[in-house]
Amino acid sequence: MKIAVIGAGVIGVTTALELASHGHDVVVYEKGSGIAQQASFATAGFIGPAMMNAWTAPGLPFKTFRKMLLGAETHAFHGLTSIPLSWFWQWQKASNHPFYKLKLEALQRLAFYSQEVLTGITEQYGLQYESSQGCMLICRQEKDLKAFQLQLDLMTDNGISFKKLDPVETRKLEPALSEEQSFHSAVIFPNDAIANCRQFALLAKQQASLLGAEFRTGQEVLALTPDAPRSVRTAAGFTEKFDHVVICAGIHSKALVKHLGIHIPSLAVYGYTLSSSVRQLIDAPVFGVMDAKHHVSIARTGQRIRVSGIAEIGLNKKPPEQCVALLYKVLNDWFPGAAKTHEAVQVWRGTRDVLTDGVPILGHSGVKGIWLNTGHGNHGWATSCGSARAIADMVSGRGCEVDLKGLGIERF
């Protein structure tokens, strides 16, 4: 079959690879000049189910809203019109729903499956990219650990391995942790990992191309039309008809399908990453580390230290370099000598497409031939390979290997 994939971030690229591996004729459209240049460019790198957060829990919306209004370091809010009232109301409903735990469980299940698929792809094609094994959550206070308890309970129910550590045990595993910074406890997730998302996306694109997939960059796709939903039109005036169209365009997905009667309740939430060269390996983290209080991650990929965090909504006119003080603070709290922060530091601001219930839309759209693989928020890298294989299986008429309950468009 002839299939269009719209979007060439890690979601779109892995989708193209899976579809091409099934023997389909695949064309990928990307409005940017290259692949993995937006949300996939400088992700935190965490893969596996441990750090999943579905953004839905009782009281979370108003707690987050209050942090933004009060100017908390972890959150930024620019303008009262930044969050549509309808979106906030749906978020509040999803958080108070008696089945909100099922959303987190679905996200963990998808991430676990995605990690398995990623391992298989890596071995099948002999891909080599920066990666390391093991992730760690560090809790400054007991309340930080309690706030994460729901995720831990679900991991226990689903057989996902982890171990709680006291500070002495933690420092034995992560000896570069600052001796000046005290903390309550940590949780180690030995089967989670850190990997370079953009490196993988570039390698996956090469493999997809070898299998016949065509990548058309610099091609902005116009909104699909009800009279010919499977005809892809570009801003340059080009039109081509396909048997199926898979939407993997992140925050732009909503505009692409709006004329088809498909409503995607997504909101642009921005996050920041700073990347710097490792100063001394002995001072760098061994594991991917997440600060549970500030929701800031620190990871070493190759010869780089990458620090990621902050949730920002609305138009911020400040340059990114002025918005990352918290990232520097957390890095210096835990690994003060790890990175060359006085030299060239790359600061990146990326967009996440967050849905009102915090989990992606994965499956058929309800319009013949139109499929959705979008709304992954800040978990796109962690769920990309599993989402891609699930979509490819469905488009090809095969049974999915993962339970997608709670991830369809029908929930909206």
Image: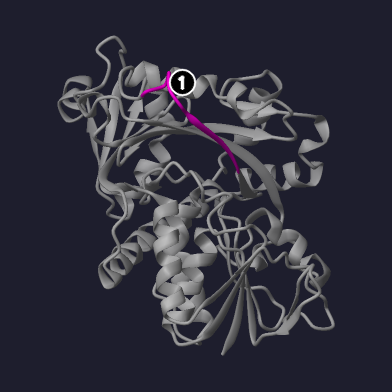
Residue at the (75%, 65%) spot, across then down: 256
Q: Which residues are magenta?
A: 340-350
- Residue 278 appears anywhere in the view: yes
Q: Horizontal and vertical percent for residue 18?
A: 44, 75
Q: Find out whether residue 341 is within the magenta segment.
A: yes
Residue 92 left/right relative to 40: right
Disc count in the image? Answer: 1
Q: Horizontal and vertical percent for residue 65?
A: 68, 29
Q: Amino acid at mark 1?
A: Tyr
Residue positioned most to the bottom:
1
Q: Horizontal and vertical percent for residue 286?
A: 24, 34
Q: Element at badge 1? A: helix
Q: Horizontal and vertical percent for residue 138?
A: 33, 27
Mark 1 — residue?
328
Residue at the (42%, 41%) spot, across then down: 150
- Foreground residue among 212 and 307: 212
- Residue 110 appears anywhere in the view: no
Residue 191 left/right relative to 74: left
Residue 223 left/right relative to 339: right
| Snapshot quadrant of residue 21 | bottom left
The crowding category of the residue bearing disc 1, from other C-alpha atoms within 10 Å (few below 14, some 14 to 19, many at least 20), is: some
- The quadrant in which the N terminus is found is bottom right
- Foreground residue among 371 and 91: 371
Q: Find out whether residue 201 is within the magenta segment.
A: no
Where 224 falls versus 376 (above or below)?
Answer: below
- Foreground residue among 368 and 307: 307
Residue positioned most to the top:
180
